[in-house]
Amino acid sequence: MTGGTSWPEGLEAAFTAYEDALARDDTAVLDALFEPGEGTLRGDDAGLLRGHDAISAFRSARGGIARRTIESVELRTLTDDTVLVVGVSAFDGGGRGLQTQLWRRTEGDWRIAVAHVTGRPKAFDRSVWRVVGDPLVHGRSTGADRSLARIRVAVKDLFDVAGQVVGAGNPERERSAPVATAHAPAVQALLDAGADVTGIARTDEFAYSLAGRNAHSGTTPNGADPTRIGGGSTSGPASAVALGQADLGLGTDTAGSLRVPASYQGLWGIRTTHGAVSRQGLLPLAQSFDTVGWLARTPDVLAAAVAVALPEADGTVDGGTVDGGTLLVADALLDAAEPATVRAFDVWLEASGRDVRRVVLPDLDDLAETLRVVQAAEAWRNHGTWVTAHPGALGADVAERFALAATVTPDDEAAARARLPELRRRIREAIGGGVLCLPTVPGPAPSRTATGPDVLATRRATLRMTAVAGVGGLPAVSAPLLRVDGAPVGVCFVGAAGTDRALVARAAATTRPTHSSHQPR
């Protein structure tokens, strides 16, 4: 059924072919029915895709759509060769949607120039959330401290929330996990300050990944750039905050699991000093490096969370304060980043007006390998029995990581553990009472269509940079201060142990560059 006008010659056949190809997930036909070039647009609730190649890449990673029937179509002829088509669809599983397309005819062929999809309403995005409520847990409504009142919190699926289970990103684990009888202290502290827990957000399986890709619940969306992955393993809380579904994400950082999604999605995030925030009620990955942290869209909300969890004044080190002027830079860390990121960082650093002092750190490969071995040994000790008892329960990438963890010998672990105190001492001596500054990650988030080997290569490169704070046991704040290739990249500030609150304030006070300064040279 159509209204408004009749089909121009050939357009009905093209529209029907498009709907049939959607039903079959025939990406070749769909690609052919979209105009080539950079001017083609496709939008939905996740954002706007620009250019035929970006649309094609998104489609190849999406999979098929839910089965639907077109109930009615409205046509509006704009010119002889340009027609607006609006289709009303009914989904077999219930609900309705709209498909709006601008079709153009070139040399007799009709192709889509612009498309906008309004899908059926979601109860919630299961790639972001495991459990949601209105809210799930109410914060304290009275009391002296209401500094987080009206703040909505997304809790990573590793923390105990009373009445819920810890699923750890795996449905098999979720089915057999015990119900928590009390909130983890990190959760309770936020509730006591008036925050509401909106829900329990997804994590990469057992927090043993940095990609934000979960074989069971899907790839979490990137709230800053829908064409890219969101990062993990604090993937769900990061996406919830970036998409505006929560104001604060409670997560963990072992080898970058919070800093990476903060950088990828343009958020403020902090990994706290190792041991500064209680890890009681938190499912561990590797206790030698596991830390609690938070994500927020603004530094004010992040600072409020830090103040609640770390109420004592902690901005001093050995009687001195965090250096408010000079920034420490290590050339090895810049060498580890992508060239475009380094150019953007250099422009930002110059625009900040801060003095810079060069420091030398331990070999980055040594840091990353030491962290990797100890982390793997502890991860297998914590979860190896469960993994062995549930063959096939893990996604391929995490299963491979646990298989490698199982091969770490006692001698391997002992050698790596023997290296830790010396490496930690050298890192802390290099930073002293100052602030080390670096790009949070090597570059922007990889494409959602990036292959497994490409994502693994990014992980390895990232660990060379994130291992500094991890091995050092130091606080690290990622601030959304750079843009590279149109996507966010964080600037990371690493301070001395115990300077968490001062470090957030220091990062927030740093001069922001202008928009043009964000662009790589």
Image (cartoon, helix red, strand yellow):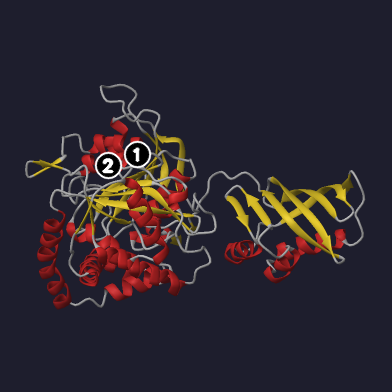
- Residue 332 image offset from top left, x and y in percent: 26, 66
Q: Secondary structure at mark 1?
A: helix
Amino acid marked by disc 2: Val
| Image vertical order of residue 463 relative to residue 509, above or below | below
The dot on residue 504 is: 2
Q: Is residue 258 visible?
A: no
Residue receiving disc 1 = 299
The dot on residue 22 is: none
Closer-to-camera residue (72/368): 368
| Image vertical order of residue 387 relative to residue 440, above or below | below
Q: Are marks 1 and 2 in contact (CB under 8 Å)?
A: yes
Judge the density around disc 2: few (<14), some (14-19), many (≥20) Cα neighbours within 10 Å.
many
| Image vertical order of residue 345 relative to residue 270, above or below | below
Which quadrant holds residue 309?
Answer: top left
- Residue 210 image offset from top left, x and y in percent: 37, 61
Closer-to-camera residue (295/214): 295
Amino acid marked by disc 1: Pro
What is the quadrant of the C terminus in the image? bottom left
Q: Using residue 151 as the reference point, say whether residue 223 is left or right of it.
A: right
Mark 1 or 2 closer to N-term?
Answer: 1
Closer-to-camera residue (338/160): 338
Residue at the spot 24% in from the left edge and 48% down from the top edge: 272
Closer-to-camera residue (327/151): 327
- Residue 269 image offset from top left, x and y in percent: 33, 47
Q: Secondary structure at mark 2?
A: helix
Which quadrant holds residue 163?
Answer: top left
Q: Is residue 488 visible?
A: yes
Residue at the spot 18% in from the left edge and 64% down from the top edge: 361
- Residue 198 image offset from top left, x and y in percent: 43, 38
Q: How many marks?
A: 2
Residue at the spot 14% in from the left edge and 48% down from the top edge: 433
